[in-house]
Each structure stands twice: as C-alpha cells, then as structure tokens.
Image: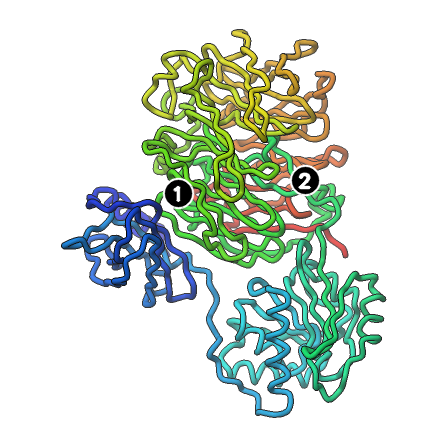
Amino acid sequence: MTGFFKRSVFLTVIAAVLFITTVPAQAVDMKLGPYVQFTDPHTAVVRWETATAEDSIVVYGDSPITLDARVEDATAKTVHEVTLSDVYIKEKYFYRVGYDDSGDQLTDVFWFDNAKNFTGVDVSAASDPYSPDSYTTLYQNAAAHIVAETGITKGICLVYGCGEGRLAFEIAKLTDLTVVGVDDNLTKINTAAEKLMQAGVYGNRVIVRHVSTLGTLPFTKYMANLVVSDRMITDGSCPGDVGEMFRVLRPSGGVAFLGQPSGCPNPLTQTALESWLSAGSLTYTTTSDSNGLWSKVVKPEVTGTGWWTQQYGGAHNNGNSNDTLEGATGKNDFDLQWISWPDSDTQVDRMVRAHSPVANNGRMMHLGFNRVMTLDSYNGTMLWTLEIPQLMRLNIPRDASFICADDDCMYLAVKDNCWRLDGDTGIRSLTHRLNDPGHDWGCVFRYGDKLYGSAVIENAFHTTWWGTSAWFDATSGDQTAQICSKYIFADNLAGSRVWTYDSADADKGVIINSTICLGGGRIYFVESRDPDVESYSSGRVGIADLWNNQYLVALNADTGAIIYQQPISASVADGTVIFYLLYTNETLLLAASDTQYHLYKFNAVDGVEVTTNWPKSFAWASNNHGHHMDRPAVMGDNVYYSTQAYNISTGTSVSAGTNGHCGIVAGTANALLSREGNINMWHKTAGSSNWANIRPNCWLSTIGSGGMILAPDGGGGCDCYGWFHTSVAFVKSGP
C-alpha cells in the first residue's frame, strides 16, 4: 500500500468519525450504552438499556449516511440485545439504536469496526470425518466431561499425545479453544491432519505437529490453558514426560485434565495415572465414577507473581506490581513468549497518554480507540473485545485510574456507570450506577471488599485525540487542566452504596483525581477548598485557584469516616503540569511539577509532612517532549522520579537508573521498565538492557505482571524508527 493511499484511507476514516458527531439524536431515553460484542467473525451483538420498557431497533450500514439494514425486536424490555448476523470481515459499520414510539426514536450514529473482530471460526456443526466405531461415543463423552469439569473454553488446548486427532476434533466443536495436538507417531499425525482438513477445522481451529519426543516440546512454557491426552484414552497409558507436560501449562488456573471415560478397550489404571503425576511432584485430585477415571491438576501462580491491577500498579498508585519476573535481571534472561494483537490500528495514538493496560489472574485488559480488549497474558489469545462508543478518556496524567481488575472481573467506568465485566467472557455481570444526573463516574479502585468511585461534572474528561493538541504535553492551557471530583464513595460488590464523602458538605473541597490512592486501610486524596474552585461549573479545572487552600485528606476505607484533614503548606509547589499522590509502607509521597520537579513526604497515619531531609526539588530533564510530566515509581524503599532517586526512609540520593524519554517507569520487585526509545529494563544490580524496535507509548504501556513483561503495542502513529507494530510478551527462560 502506498503512503498516499494509506493516508487517503486514514483521512476518510477520520472524516467518517467526525461526521457521526454531527448527526442529531432523537428523544431516546437511554440508561446505558450502546456497545457491541462480536460472537463470531460475521456476528455482532448490540446491547443497551433504556429507562422504560421499549421495543428494540437497530439500523446500520457501511456508511454513516446510508443505514439501510434494520433489525427489530417487538418485545418491550429495558435491557436490549440485538444480533446483527451478516457483518463482513474487515468492514466498519455505522449504527443507531432506539425504539418505535409512533415513529422511530433513534440515537446518534455510532460505529464499530469488524476488522477488530478477533473471534475464532465456529466449528460446532462440523461433520465428523472419522468413521463411526466403538470410540465415537467415548470421545464425545470425554470431551463433554473435560469441558464441563474445567470450564475452560478459550485460549489454547494442548492434546499431549494427540493420536489421530479425534479428541482434538471433539474439543474444538464444543469450545472456542485453539487446539494444538502433538505426537511422536508420524503416521498418526498424518492421519490427524488429513481427517481434520477433511472436516474443515485444520488450520483455523486445530493444528497438529509431529515431535521426535514428547519429552521435549517445541513450545515456550506456560502456553496452554488446558492439557488433555488422546493416547490415554486409546492406549490406557501415560505418554511422554509429566514434567514437560506441566512446563507448558499456564499458571494462575491452567488445568491438566487427564484420564479416560468409562468403557475404553484399554483401561487406564488409577495407580498408573497417579504414579505418573506423582513423579512430577504434582498436586492433583482424582475421580473414578460413571464418567470414567480422571485426574485434575491446577497450576498455581508463578512464585513471586505481582499483578498490575490499576493505572499505576494497584490502588496504592505507587507504580509497582512487585513482580519478581522469576529472578530475571535483563533482556538476555527472557524468551519471547508470544506475538499477538492488538496492533497500532486498534489504538488511538502513542502520544495521547491513555490508560495503561491492567492485568490480573492471567488476563490483560487493554484500551483502544473506543474499544476494550482482553487477552490471555500467557499466550496472547484474544479472549474478548467490546466496542464502546463513549469510552474515550485520555490525558490520564490529569485524571485517575478508570479501569481495574480483580481475580474474576474487570471494572470499567463508562459515562455515569461502572461496568463489572466477566474476565473470561466480557459479559456485563453487574452495573454500579452513579444515579446522579449531570455527573460522570470518575475514579475506579478495587480495594479490600469494596469498589471505590467518584463523581465528576459530566463532559469534563479529556477526549481530544487528533493533532498535536492531543499530545497533552503542553506546560499551560487546557491540556494541563486537572479532572476533579465533586465527591468520592464506596460501593459493596453487590452494587450498593456504603458511604459517600461529599465536597458540598461543610469543610470539604473539590477532589483532584490524580491524587486518589489507597493503602493501610485508608483512602487518601488532595482537595481544594478555594471558593472559586468549589463553585466551578466544570469538572475539568484549569484555574490557578486550584492550588489554593489545599488539604490532604484520609478516610477510613471501610466506613468513610474522616481520619484527618491536614492543611497543605503554601510552600508546596503548584501542580500546574502534574500533581500526584502515592502510598507506600505508611508513607505518602506527593509529586508536583511546575517549572521543575518537586517531591514531598507525608506520614500516612496522621498526614503530617516530613521535613527532615525532605522535600526534594530538581530540574526537568533536558528533553521535555513530555518528560516534564514524569511521575514517581516506588521500588523497595526507594522512589524513582525522572532523573533522580531517593531512599524514602532517609531522603538520601540513590542510583536513579535510566528514564530519558517521554513516558514513565513501571516498577517490578527489582527492576524498572521504561522507554529509552525501545523497551528498556533497568535492574538495580545488573543495569540496563533493551529490546530493539519495540516501542512503548508516551505514557505507560509496558508492565511487569504475572511473572512476565507485557507490552501491548504502544507505537501507533509513530514511524520514526521502524517500530515493530504488534503486541509482545516476554518470559524468563528455562523451566
């Protein structure tokens, strides 16, 4: 594709996106949405909610002007779901939703992009290519039992000793798994490939590979969500090496489900199966009943695992996951684990300073252009995506974390609600509602047994994404305006409000979102009690009075009771460029940037400023292409802030590592990840190393989590150095 043609296509897309904002909406009483989820390569499901029970209408087409396709459901309901079953691969669609109230009442025009549809081919109706015999029902029963008992339907399934591919075929029919079969019998592998091609599943859902020995597989460790064995069913014996089987099983819930159904001609004994598993010192549970003999092995977290669950690592906001990376100290200690989506085309731009990826329990959630994507951290499988037209929220240095993850779910703020999404499927399982007209949901934090949020005057968030004004690296003007909340609150996990701290009450102020953090059983923030700020009509506050009459506030995280409200000294610098608060080890660190960097220390228990060997002030880095917006990260008892680092306890200077480009560092237990042109890793004892031609974005897109380095593509819009525009992950070499 020529440069001119690519630019013409891009500008056409820009024109279409800009056009849809000019189409007037009609009187549709929307409560939530709409948004789109793909269920197969040609099917999109549109969901939304209305305040009153109505019928459902979707009109759509490949042009925002001509929406000539229509789907209707006459059933009156408040929760709407309409399936579009004829969408084309790689096509962008425009749509409106609504209902018939003596004539169509339709929303504005929205869009979704089926080129970002990563679902697999549905082979549930594939014809069985194997001749019916005594094993036909056995394989069907085995596959059904495996799926029912493990619940694993997405990711990668390894058939360890796949024989002629019959178990692989049955599992593919029942799930969305990519099934990989290996065997050391070339004749059986050739038969498997022939039969699976005949069924139309080979290459798109199932692949098989001949290996010289099952004791050494040509795969990285941690690649399989599910491990099963065909040869245990046919031969009644345990193939290969149990240690090698376990090596490739994914941590944090990967399952090996091994055995055979009842009635197999060559019975597998419980003694043989358990002796094989015990040889690998594996923990297992065994059942022997009408379903057959089966042992289940669940792989736990990698030792030393830490998860990056919020924008800056966790609710503490201190920029560190505390992941040990299995002891790796530099680039040469790692293997490439996977290359996958998303690529640059799913993103907005590298400079818009969007939300970081978040990861927990083996899943990584990543935001794109009005879309959210969730991948398996260990093999790069795209688990699900949602196209959400009202999701855009940029310039995060002046805002708060608005997505987070726990073991089972993802939480995502969209307009005035926070959606709880099932981590494996993306299905919205609960909606935490703000229920306050004129306000949008601000921060999102999971801490303890509660979900924390805040309320921002609506339409305050930074959403500009086109042109240099959307780089958000200015030192003055609207780009530097802080997003501020009117009040902050806690919900229980059932969605009910537990407590609210409201700035409208006496002796309370407007909360600066970038300072909200939690730790030690408390929630902290800085608020301004200046009258001009409190009466400001926007949640995007860019007036100088924001830095007046400030208080450091701590609340009991469970009850919302005020623990302290400490006035902040007038000597604390204005945060006209950035203003951050973080928690670590009963200490709060406040970072500000005006014409240089400033760092202040407070006791988290009582909010008193520590002045012995503190505060710190130092010059901006010479290259200020966004670097003047830097924020601190904690590693151990040290804090790393741009070109300087300090021991938090003593205030003495320590080695600062490297961080010489736009973007910020992401900490692990013993290393910092940053952008030095490419991805750079600085280890506190081994120094720096980097991965060439892999570019993080200009804020934070590379993290250490789950024992790995996760790097969803961050180079969108930048061709300066021939970047490798795809997402990658690295894992420590060895078993």
Q: In the rendered view of the protein, which quadrant contains the C terminus?
A: bottom right
Left or right: where 108 falls relative to 330: left
Label 1 crowd bin: few (<14), some (14–19), many (20+), radius 10 Å: many
For mark 1, give the secondary structure.
loop
Disc marking residue 391: 1
Spatial CA distance of label 1 from label 2 is 36 Å
Q: Which of 190 and 158 is in front in this view?
A: 158
Farthest-out residue, top? 570
Q: Is residue 625 visible?
A: no
Residue 486 appears in the figure: yes
* Residue 261: image tag: none
Choose mark 1 or mark 2, whichever is in front.
1
Does residue 173 lie above or below 415 as drawn? below
**Which residue is rendered at x = 64% and y = 41% of the image?**
690
CB contact under 8 Å: marks 1 and 2: no
Query: Which is nearer the eye, 596 or 331?
Result: 596
The quadrant where residue 236 appears: bottom right
Mark 2 falls on what kind of element?
A: strand
Compared with 478, 71 (above or below) is below
Residue at the extreme left of the image, as rendered: 102
For disc 2, the marked residue is: 689
Q: In which quarter of the image is the N terminus?
A: bottom left
Residue at (46% x, 35% y) in the render: 353
Quadrant in the rendering for residue 673: top right
* Residue at (75, 36) in percent of width and height: 686
Indicate the position of residue 674 as horizontal and vertical percent values: 60, 36
Answer few, some or many: residues within 10 Å of disc 2's Cα (few below 14, many 20 plus, some between 14 and 19).
Answer: some
Q: Nearer the viewer, residue 165 or 499?
A: 499
Residue 476 in percent (x, y) is at: 40, 19
From the viewer's perspective, is residue 134 above or below residue 503? below
Residue type at mark 2: give it: Ser
Would residue 45 appear left or right of 591 to someone viewing this image? left
